[in-house]
């Protein structure tokens, strides 16, 4: 039987449901487990952690909205992650981790061989947590490093912390998607992020919605997009004090970059067909990012990755 998904949201879990979840994990019949906002006792949480430790089919684990609600649960999850080798995406959005809790989780996260997507949005994190997260970004031996990172709504992180993250993203990370929405970044931090984007060879999506930016930031970002070739395909600037005209200019430039890649890719496909070979894979990003006609609306992320809306996807 092919691995399936278990998705329960905002409900108390009965003992029978917990037993079924544990059985599915032990039988390697679950690829996606989402218990978003569910209520369960500490004993049942521990049972699920012990079962997921040995699960080899589980690729996505969603414990968003307060499921990991205490230091004891953080320790139980860390113990499970130290043994598990299959989880690729871990969602802990809305968990009261704090810096101390992430310090408990970090050794297991750093050693996990498959983890590439991590959601730590609204987890009450500060600068100490950023120092730990930066260590998860670069590739390390067989580990690819994080490719998708969400740090939305962590207002305790200071400009010093964000500057450290920007340097880490620019230097050696493989991050493709970076969600920093609803943090009080301001124009100074946005300028550092622009440098990081210009330096990164992999960053395709940057979400800066509701981060306190002004036209000053937008002009810096526009100059970056206009004058420096980057991998960036989507830049979300909604809910900021930025003129629609500047947002549209940035959007148009990003769209032009995609069109140029598509044309170049199509020419390459034609040449390969003329040589009798299979055409090359489509260019990175083609058909993946949508830029809205209304620049005040959020750009749509069409790839698999972080966020509850993508949890239904069971094929990686």
Image (spheres, rainbow, N blue to C red):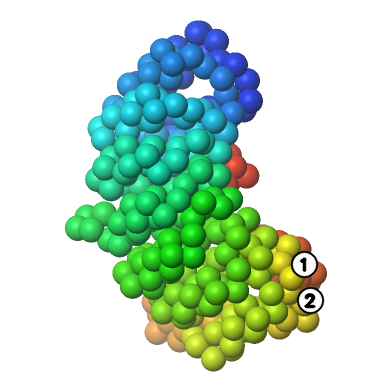
Residue 76 is tagged as none
Residue that badge 2 annotates: 244
Q: Position of residue 79 (x, y in %)?
A: 29, 29
Residue 212's place in the image compared with 93, above or below, is: below
**Label 1 vs 2, first from the N-terminus:** 2
Q: Position of residue 16 (x, y in %)?
A: 51, 8
The residue depicted at 50 percent of the width and 8 percent of the height is 15
Residue 143's place in the image compared with 311, above or below, is: below
Label 2, secondary structure: give it. helix
Residue that badge 1 annotates: 296
Nearer the observer, 267 or 253: 253
Q: Is residue 146 left or right of residue 178?
A: left
The residue depicted at 26 percent of the width and 54 percent of the height is 143
Farthest residue toward the top? 15
Nearer the observer, 74 or 27: 74
The residue depicted at 54 percent of the width and 81 percent of the height is 261
Report how far apart the C-alphas of labels 1 and 2 lie in the structure: 7 Å
Farthest residue toward the bottom? 227
Q: Quadrant of residue 101?
A: top left
At label 2, counting other C-alpha atoms closer than 10 Å, the crowd grade (few under 14, some 14-19, many 20 or more) is: some
Q: Quadrant of the N terminus?
A: top left
Nearer the observer, 192 or 120: 192
User: CB under 8 Å between callouts 1 and 2?
Assistant: yes
Q: Position of residue 4 (x, y in %)?
A: 49, 30
């Amino acid at each position: 039987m092919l691995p399936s998904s278990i998705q329960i949201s905002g409900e108390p879990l009965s003992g029978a449901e917990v037993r079924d979840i544990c059985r599915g994990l032990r039988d390697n019949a679950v690829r996606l487990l989402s218990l978003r906002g569910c209520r369960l006792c500490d004993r049942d949480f521990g049972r699920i952690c012990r079962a997921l430790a040995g699960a080899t089919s589980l690729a996505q684990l969603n414990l968003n909205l307060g499921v990991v609600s205490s230091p004891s649960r953080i320790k139980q999850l860390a113990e499970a992650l130290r043994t598990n080798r299959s989880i690729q995406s871990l969602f802990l959005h809305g968990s009261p981790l704090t810096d101390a809790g992430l310090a408990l989780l970090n050794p297991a996260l750093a050693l996990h061989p498959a983890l590439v997507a991590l959601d730590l949005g609204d987890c009450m994190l500060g600068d100490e947590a950023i120092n730990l997260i930066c260590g998860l970004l670069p590739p390390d031996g067989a580990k690819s490093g994080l490719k998708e990172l969400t740090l939305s709504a962590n207002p305790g992180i200071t400009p010093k912390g964000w500057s450290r993250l920007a340097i880490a993203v620019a230097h050696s990370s493989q991050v493709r998607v970076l969600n920093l929405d609803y943090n009080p970044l301001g124009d100074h931090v946005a300028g550092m992020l622009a440098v990081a984007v210009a330096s990164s060879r992999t960053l395709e999506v940057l979400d800066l919605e509701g981060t306190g930016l002004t036209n000053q930031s937008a002009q810096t970002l526009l100059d970056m997009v206009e004058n420096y070739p980057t991998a960036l395909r989507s830049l979300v600037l909604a809910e900021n004090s930025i003129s629609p005209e500047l947002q549209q200019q940035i959007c148009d430039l990003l769209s032009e970059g995609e069109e140029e890649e598509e044309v170049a890719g199509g020419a390459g496909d034609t040449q390969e067909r003329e040589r009798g070979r299979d055409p090359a894979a489509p260019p990175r990003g083609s058909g993946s990012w949508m830029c809205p006609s209304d620049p005040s609306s959020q750009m749509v992320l069409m790839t698999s990755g972080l966020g509850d809306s993508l949890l239904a996807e069971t094929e990686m």
